[in-house]
Image (cartoon, helix red, strand yellow):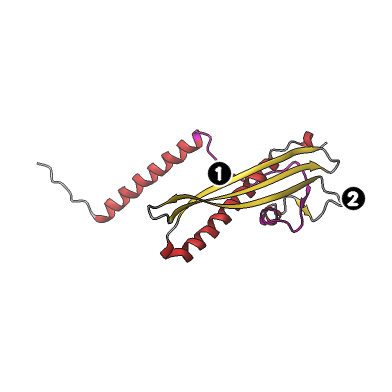
Amino acid sequence: MAQHKPMTTSTLTTRRAVVQFAALAAVGLGLAGCGFRLRGSQAFAFKSIAILPNPGVAVAQELRLSFGAAVQVLATDAPGTPAQLVLNVTNEQREKIVVGVNVSGQVREFQLRMRVRLNLRTAQGKEIIENDEIVQQRDISYNESAALAKEAEETLLYRDMQSDIVQQILRRLAAIQPGQLD
């Protein structure tokens, strides 16, 4: 009869590491095979943009910071300014709507909405995006005993919606083709 050699802890650890590595490699190959890739930095067809109004609403301010070194952000579209595009971010609205109450009539749930309207034109006045509206919404529960915490959560949700709107605007600007700038 053959003797069975007992497995040591180091052998089990080594086997577990090999199995985990193989599973991780299989997942990586599966994702690469389906075309998945991380979103990289965006390439824009323009080199300069003026964002109005200046300083403008919070979305416009965050948008100015989001371009980084890829695009020169100018403060105005005054004549003689070399901005290829002029983005007008207007009508930023924050709404808080009651969507749920209990039997006593006390609020239990709100819906937070953020709306931003934007127009994009070339320096020559050609409209590329006209009166486009971007809307984000989030639901938030409410409890009177945690009013301060809920207020802080509401602020964070508005900031999250603002960042999502800025990312949507950046994706729309990255989709502009060089031919549209003429």
- How many residues crowd around disc 1 within 10 Å: few (fewer than 14), some, or many (20 or more)? few
Q: Inspect the magenta stretch and tell me whether residue 56 lies in it.
A: yes
Point out residue 102 in the picture as x, y percentages from the top left corner: 39, 53
Q: Between residues 41 and 21, which one lies in front from this camera angle?
A: 41
Q: Residue at x 52, y 58 (%)?
A: 154
* Picture quarter with the C terminus: top right
In the picture, measured across the screen, residue 134 lies left or right of residue 102, that is right
Residue 85: quadrant of the picture? top right
Point out residue 155 in the picture as x, y percentages from the top left corner: 55, 60
In the picture, measured across the screen, residue 153 lies left or right of residue 22, that is right
Q: Amino acid at mark 2?
A: Pro
Q: Residue at x 85, y 49 (%)?
A: 82
* Picture quarter with the N terminus: top left
Stretch in magenta: 33-62
Q: Residue at x 82, y 54 (%)?
A: 76
Point out residue 79 in the picture as x, y percentages from the top left corner: 90, 50
The residue mark sitting in front, 2 or 1, is 2
| Farthest residue, direction right | 80
Q: Which residue is mark 1?
A: 38
In the picture, measured across the screen, residue 159 lies left or right of residue 142, that is right
- How many residues crowd around disc 2 within 10 Å: few (fewer than 14), some, or many (20 or more)? few
Q: Amino acid at mark 1?
A: Leu
Residue 61: quadrant of the picture? bottom right
Q: Between residues 165 and 42, which one lies in front from this camera angle?
A: 165
Where 151 sits versus 73, above or below? Answer: below
Q: Between residues 11 and 122, which one lies in front from this camera angle?
A: 122
Where 145 sits versus 58, above or below? Answer: below
**How many numbered tags mark residues here?**
2
Q: Which residue is mark 2?
A: 79
